[in-house]
Amino acid sequence: MKSKKVLLRVENLVKYFPIMQGIIIQKQVGAVHAVDDVSFDIYKGETLGLVGESGCGKSTTGRTILQLYRPSSGSVHFDGKDLVQMKGEELRKMRRKMQMVFQDPYASLNPRMTVGEIIGEPLIIHNVASGKEVQERVEHLLELVGMNPSFENRYPHEFSGGQRQRIGVARALALQPELIVCDEPISALDVSIQAQVVNLLEDLQKQFNLTYLFIAHDLSMVRHISDRVAVMYLGCIIELTGRDELYSYPLHPYTQALLSAVPIPNPVIEEKRQRILLQGDVPSPVNPPSGCRFRTRCQYAQEICADQKPAWREIKPDHFVACHFADQWL
């Protein structure tokens, strides 16, 4: 653990997207339970990995934390201030301290703006720099992310995916934020480029004491970059602990199944390992199961799993899990 100072505290965060019906007179007929009662802390200077299957609510969690989506309920305390209660100019000032690296490097950069305009825009919007100073800062940021400063007059279509993602990282760094939400920043890149981007993020973290929420579904990459890992399933966080503890002693059946699918580069161990194959499909977030969300696919599910939502509890020091039967794997 790099620090015990809590930079971000998320408490009972909920985000539902309404499902509307009708053309002229619309009425709500349901809701997508994208994020449902999520709570966790991120300590200053650490990287918290957030993993889970596609569609489980990881990206929505990241965007709701930054107030790109306004939460349905819950609180997000950044540096002791509740972002949910903020609006207008007050929230805009807080945005300087929180930035995001988006998943798709092809969609997150404006094709009609040069690289210099893209990276310099936050500096101008927040009145951090003007005139010649903006150009100097842009050139410095390009150097920081390993790119030639002369690229500032080029357009995004002239770059590869890895280079575009570096431009996205430079834009996120422009305002010298404390927290960066990395929303699957490497999933759209070639494997050879993924390592370069992750190494860049690690170097920048050491240099500027950055704090990351690193959202991904590549478990081996999450183990490499994260200090702690949170596992998400159908809108809920079901396990949270240090990365080595999670990979060595997973206590939730879903985490055990996820980790059993990660290949090990040792043919002797790999041959003896038993894969845990989950039955059925992920339930719809429009109508999630009662009690434990995972019970419809869990081999250990019993009647209590349908009747009661499992409590979020600290079963070992700094090892949190939401499962009625987690004690049996201690």
Image (tube, helix red, strand yellow):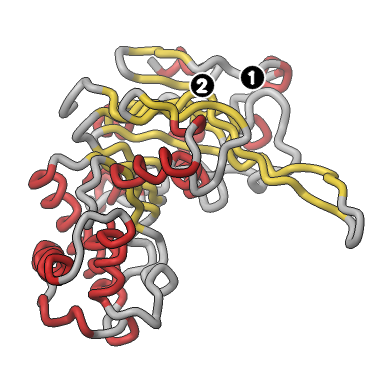
Name which residue lies at 57% across and 43% down. 278
State whether residue 247 is above or below residue 217.
Answer: above
Using the rendered view, name the quadrant where residue 37 is placed.
Answer: top right
Relative image position of residue 119 (x, y in whole percent): 26, 67
State whether residue 165 is above or below residue 315.
Answer: below
Amino acid type at image mark 2: Ala
Relative image position of residue 178 (x, y in whole percent): 24, 40
Evaluate if marks 1 and 2 touch, with contact meaning CB atoms under 8 Å apart. Answer: yes
State whether residue 139 is above or below residue 268.
Answer: below
Amino acid type at image mark 1: Lys
Left or right side of 305 for 12: left
Query: Would you name the residue on which mark 2 appears?
Result: 322
* Quadrant of image for the C terminus: top left
Element marked by disc 1: loop
Element marked by disc 2: loop
Left or right side of 206 for 327: right
